[in-house]
Image (spheres, grey):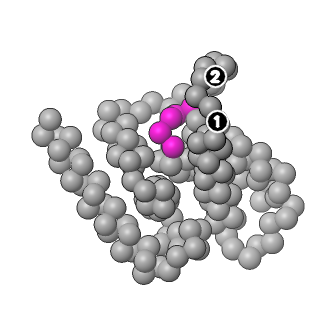
Amino acid sequence: MEFEEIYKTYWQKIYRVCRGYVSDDDWAKDITQDTFIIVWNQLHTFRNESAISTWIYRIAVNNCLKQIEKQKRLPAGNFPEHITETVQIPIDNKIAFLYQCINELKEADRIIISLELEDIKQAEIASIVGISEINVRVKIHRIKEKLTEKFKSYERD
């Protein structure tokens, strides 16, 4: 698979996973771009031991974790303004609230539900996050219960 095809096929999916993992839209776009830079640089090392999507999602997950850890170590302060983004992704209020709710979950739960929302098979999610498929099913069920409760209170307000 050529890089350009990979980029076109997976950019939106990886962005949504990153967006579910971090609370800031611009930060998610940055992590997505960083992920594809890694994919570009490492594509020659892909050994077809798993689906290419699994490999890319693993890179994205590791990149999200790395960026979050790096952010924790940075001192608070004024950062330079971002360059105007060419890709605009409109987000309505319910989706924004969903991302907010996902962001309040534990790190492992955020990545699991983000991958589930991308219709990634539970076996593949298990492979990406390194837990059993049964554990993935249980976690998804519990996460959905938590999110459903939050949405019930959102719709009452």
Q: Amino acid at mark 1?
A: Leu
Of 62 and 85, nearer the camera is: 62
The residue labelled by disc 2 is 79
The residue labelled by disc 1 is 74
In this view, the mark in front (2 or 1): 1
Determine if the magenta segment contains residue 23.
yes
Q: Quadrant of the N terminus?
A: bottom right
Location of residue 33 in the rendering, given as x and y in whole percent from the top left corner? 69, 40
Of 96 and 101, nearer the camera is: 101
Disc 2 + disc 1, Cβ < 8 Å = no
Element under disc 2: loop
Q: From this viewpoint, which residue is outermost toward the left?
A: 156
Residue drawn where x is 61% and y is 57% of the image:
61
Q: Which residues are magenta?
A: 22-26
Location of residue 106 in the rendering, given as x and y in whole percent from the top left corner? 43, 56
Mark 2 to mark 1 CA distance (whole Å): 11 Å
Determine if the magenta segment contains residue 11.
no
